[in-house]
């Protein structure tokens, strides 16, 4: 699936709303293309009647718990079950435990024991729209491609200003470029630049799979940031205390810990 894809269920949102109590149930929607088809530990707990809402209402000894403590108890219950599961990471602002938040971060893991798991992915729910966090590799490819394109354009613009004389060597002429520029020399220069760009016999303007992956990842991040900015989640945060909330994830093949190869919300916990 393309990393720019998203999922939203207006019927669920209109009927139940969205909060930290039911965001996992919303993510496990049967039509959500991001969810795994395997039976997760979250569904196992749900069949036993165990959920964040249950802990809030009944607690562990019949005493209702606060939303934050209820989430901690739910995480403890998940930690006792090995297998694939979804973790709801804590919010940056503790007030979002009590009130709806425009952003929820969900981590998809494969747990082997209570203290060890492998991160398989990170997802964001932004005002009811579910996005997959792009991979670090994809974003790096996109940034490097943009940088190289900019440098190539700058070199092309400067190359027509270079002049060479045997007596003086290379000089630069930035004035009246269009008047004394030889059209034949310019045509030859453009051909040389095209040959330098096309290293794998691609057509001009054609992108390979890696470049397309980078552009899709960059577009996904842009879409998430635009939606967050419209919800005032970013613009209302004090710049002096702002921390990074958008993350990218790409678990390495041999990752066995909760932190290797993954950048997630700074408030995330194992």
Image (cartoon, rainbow, N blue to C red):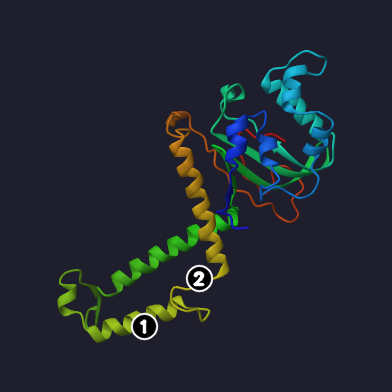
Q: Residue furthest bottom?
A: 184
Tell me residue 167's x, y (percent).
Answer: 22, 83
Q: Which mark is residue 110?
A: none
Rendered location of residue 239, percent (x, y): 43, 31
Measured as percent of width and height from the top left, residue 163 is found at: 24, 78
Q: Which residue is mark 2?
A: 207
Cα–Cα gap, marks 1 and 2? 19 Å
Q: Earlier in the sequence, mark 1 or mark 2?
A: 1
Taking the view exactly as shown, the residue that stands out farthest to the top is: 63
Image spot of residue 156 (x, y percent): 33, 72
Residue at left 57%, top 58%? 138
The foreground one among 108 and 38 is: 38
User: Can you see residue 116?
Assistant: yes
Residue 191, numbered label? 1
**Residue 88 seen in this snapshot:** no
Question: Is the residue 74 above or below the residue 147 in the image?
Answer: above
């Amino acid at each position: 699936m393309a990393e720019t894809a998203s999922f939203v269920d207006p019927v669920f949102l209109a009927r139940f709303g969205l909060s930290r109590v039911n965001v996992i149930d919303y993510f496990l929607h049967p039509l959500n293309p991001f969810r795994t088809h395997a039976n997760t530990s979250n569904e196992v707990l749900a069949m036993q009647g165990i959920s964040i809402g249950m802990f809030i209402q009944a607690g562990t000894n019949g005493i209702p718990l606060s939303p934050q403590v209820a989430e901690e108890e739910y995480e403890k219950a998940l930690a006792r079950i090995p297998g694939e599961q979804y973790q709801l990471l804590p919010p940056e602002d503790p007030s979002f435990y009590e009130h709806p938040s425009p952003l929820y971060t969900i981590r998809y893991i494969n747990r082997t024991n209570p203290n060890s798991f492998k991160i398989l992915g990170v997802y964001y729910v932004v005002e009811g729209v579910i996005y997959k966090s792009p991979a670090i590799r994809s974003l790096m490819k996109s940034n490097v491609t943009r940088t190289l394109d900019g440098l190539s354009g700058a070199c092309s613009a400067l190359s027509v200003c270079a002049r060479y004389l045997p007596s003086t060597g290379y000089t630069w002429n930035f004035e009246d470029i269009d008047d004394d520029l030889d059209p034949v020399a310019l045509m030859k220069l453009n051909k040389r630049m095209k040959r330098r760009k096309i290293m794998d016999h691609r057509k001009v303007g054609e992108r390979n799979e890696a470049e397309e992956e980078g552009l899709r990842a960059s577009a996904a991040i842009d879409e998430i940031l635009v939606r967050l900015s419209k919800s005032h989640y970013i613009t209302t945060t004090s710049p002096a205390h702002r921390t990074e909330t958008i993350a990218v994830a790409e678990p390495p093949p041999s990752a066995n810990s909760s932190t290797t190869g993954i950048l997630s919300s700074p408030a995330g916990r194992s």
